[in-house]
Amino acid sequence: MTNQIVLVLDFGGQYKELIARRVRECNVYSLIKPGQTPLDEILAMKPIGIILTGGPDSVYRDGAPKCDPALFDCGIPVLGICYGLQLMAYSTGGTIAPCKVSEYGRTQMTVDSTSVLFAGLEPRQIGLMSHTDQVAVLPEGFVSVASTVHCRNAAIANKKRELYGVQFHPEVENTPNGTEVIWNFLYRVCGAIGDYDMKDYETRMIAQIREQVGATGKVLLGLSGGVDSSVCAALLAKAIPGRLWCIFVDHGCMRKNEGDEIEAAFRNRDLNFIRVDASADFLSALSGVTDPEQKRKIIGEKFVRTFEAEAKKIGKIEFLAQGTIYPDVIESGANNSATIKSHHNVGGLPKDMGFQGLVEPLRGLFKDEVRMLGRQLGLPEPIVSRQPFPGPGLAIRIVGEITADKLAILREADAIFREEMKKSRIKADQYFAVLTNTRSVGVVGDFRTYHYTVALRAVKTTDFMTCEYAPLSHKLLSRVSSRIVNEVKNVGRVVYDITGKPPATIEWE
């Protein structure tokens, strides 16, 4: 690694990935490590700066997560955020105490514009607060550089030791000038030169792929046609032209006409493209299965088994490639995160894949970075801008057992919703239909019906780690509902999901 590095030390905060992403947006490479990472390991990585994340604990509680106090005396600039601020103050002699009035949400702040953190900003700022503790007594050598009505130490600084902290969250969109605060820390304090971008990443990954695969190794990739697998394919094809086999497994859980569209998009590209219709096998394996985690693992294993069967026809294939990206890893329980749901690319792989190694060149990228890389590699915009689609496909957009009839219902309902959304030009980052396992009584003409309920989901997000529901107009929802219940057999009711993430996930299963 030749780039400058900023370490993000994780203390359990929900926004750690956003912090890392904001740093990269400032053209500085970021790496997330556990908060308890030994100091010698930190020093060995030679970071130009360290950012301490937020967290749900109280720093004065026995057993609360802490870093080595010597971290603050090693000469590396440190920025503490929320819990990270309190940990810094606590570790350097300050006092942390419960707030008399806790602060949550967008909060008016007064900042010291002469402080390096707020250089170029107006004295009145908005910051997202979320805390029940605060710095009651500053450590020696620190000064307050921001305050709110209820928090006199909303930001602190020790210029001599290059230690800074903010009680608010500069990484979220609800802090309008938060990225500028992070930029100031990176460039005005840490001395960043901005040597990280997608061109640099592409160059490094091509070199890494060639080193891993060698001069003669062959690679097999499951090409779904989604953004991640497509960008992965384009990158591998550039790194090892002529030695990449892309197998598109049609597992029977694709969206309407999707299989044909994927084949058309990739058949004539610089790839060895193979399409396998395994829908009957997948549906048989999924028969009677209702648990979403089991669905994922069944599909993941059958994917690999199908790969192996096709690979035998090709000849010896040493490596399996996957389009795994960073949010997949995080949500599957890496970096000490709770397992929300396992992903097809992470949790569903059996131990005996039969391959020499696993190639995952996108594993460290966020979705927006993957799209940037795809454009850089010359992929068409419809592929690069394609909405995320889970590896198990419609299998996890059907609540309960998967059947051919249910898939047919969902394909039609989903196609109608996506068509109407596209025509409406309403901005939403992801939208799709879900076939619930709920039936409800209805009436058509003089007859009683007992049909399925379809749920619609449309969200606005920048990172897919958090989201808000898209406020669709009643006129649009009415039109979609009318079309679905009139054009799709066995659907009697349509509802709209208005839950954000958290507490929900974007997908239903």
Image: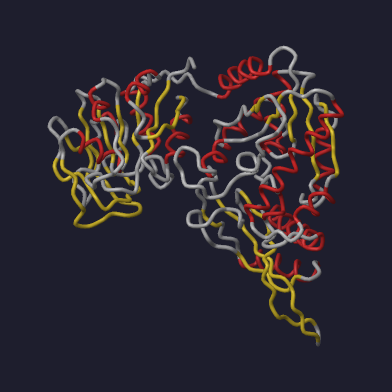
Furthest residue in direction front, as rendered: 352
> Is residue 505 placed above or below 261 in the rendered structure?
below
Where does the C terminus fall, quadrant-wise? bottom right
Residue at 57% x, 41% y: name it. 328
* Residue 378 in sight in this render: no
Image location of residue 494, percent across then percent down: 67, 69
> Is residue 321 placed above or below 107 in the rendered structure?
above
Of residues 13 and 189, which is closer to you in this image?
A: 13
Q: How many marks?
A: 0
Colour scheme shown: secondary structure
Of residues 435 and 256, which is closer to you in this image?
A: 435
> Is residue 128 placed above or below 304 in the rendered structure?
below
> Is residue 98 placed above or below 305 in the rendered structure?
below
Image location of residue 456, percent across then percent down: 65, 61
Q: Within the image, what quadrant is residue 391 found in?
A: top right
Image location of residue 438, percent across then percent down: 67, 71
